[in-house]
Amino acid sequence: MGHEFRSTDEIEVPASVEDVWTAIATGPGIDSWFMGRNEVADGQVRMAFGGYRPTSEVTACDPPRHFAHDSGKAPDGRFIAYEFLVEGREHASTVLRMVTSGFLPGDDWADEFEAMTLGGALFRRTLQEYLTYFPGRTARPLTVFGPVVTDWDEAWEKLGAALAEKLPDAVEFHRNAHTLGLRTGSGLYRFLRGFAGPMIAAHHVFEGAESEQDWQDFLDTTLGEQR
C-alpha cells in the first residue's frame, strides 16, 4: 500500500529576499530553524540529527528565487522533496511558498504521516518566527533525546510546569498534539514527540552559552531517567 502526499504553505515575513534565501538555501540558515546541523555543498543538502544523516540532491537553485531538493527514491518507493519559492513584496517583506511532497511505503504509513505532518507544522512555524524575529542571524542548534515517554499527557504537563520556571519570559508560538515551540529574546526552543518514543529537544540558540548537556539534564530531571 503506502501513501503519496503533497502540501503547500505560504507565509509573508518582514525579512528581505536575501535573508529568506540564506535561511532556506545555506547550511547556517537551515541550522537556524529546521533541525540538527546542515550543510549545502556540491549539489547536496546534508543533515546530521542524532544518528540520522540523510542527504538530499539539489534539484533547483536559482538565487534568490527558487530552491528545491529531494531525497531520491528508495527501493521501497520512499522519498521526500522540498521546494521553496521566494517573492519580494513592498515595504521590505517577502512571501515564501513551500511545497513538501513524497511517498511513505507500507500499510503502517498513517502513524508516520501524522508525526511528519505535525512535526512539519512546527518547522514551518519556526521558520516564520526566525525570519520575523531573528532574520540574518545564525543560531547554534542544540539537539537532545530525552527519556522514552510512556504517558504523553503527563509528560507534556510536567514539561510545561518545568519550562514556566526555566524560561519564564518565553512566548509560545506553536503547539499541537506532538510539538511545542517557545520563543525568547535569545532563542527558539522546541519539543517534539519522537516517533520511537523519546521526548526530543531541538532548539536554536542565538545568544548565551547553554549546552546540549544542560538540556539533557533538564529533560532527565523533568521526565525521569527511563532510558
Image (tube, rainbow, N blue to C red):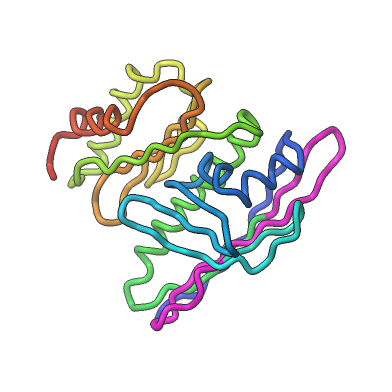
> Residue at the location (69% across, 43% down)?
20
Q: How many marks?
A: 0
Q: Is residue 170 left or right of residue 147?
A: right
Q: Is residue 164 left or right of residue 221?
A: right
Q: Quadrant of residue 191?
A: top left
Query: Where the N terminus falls, by quadrant?
Result: bottom left
**Residue 218 located within the stretch drawn in magenta:** no
**Residue 96 located within the stretch drawn in magenta:** yes
Q: Is residue 29 above or below residue 171?
A: below
Region rendered in magenta: 70-97
In front: 40, or 151?
Answer: 40
Query: Where the C terminus falls, by quadrant?
Result: top left
Q: Is residue 218 above or below residue 190?
A: above
> Residue at the location (30% across, 36% down)?
156
In front: 174, or 126?
Answer: 126
Q: Is residue 73 above or below residue 11?
A: below
In front: 109, or 201?
Answer: 201
Q: Is residue 137 left or right of residue 141?
A: right
Residue 93 x %, y %: 78, 37
Residue 129 x %, y %: 59, 35
Q: Is residue 43 above or below residue 50?
A: below
Residue 219 x %, y %: 24, 33
Task: Give the farthest residue toward the right.
Answer: 90
> Residue at the location (64% across, 61% down)?
83
Task: Give the farthest residue toward the left.
Answer: 226
Residue 207 x %, y %: 49, 22
> Residue at the location (35% across, 78% down)?
106
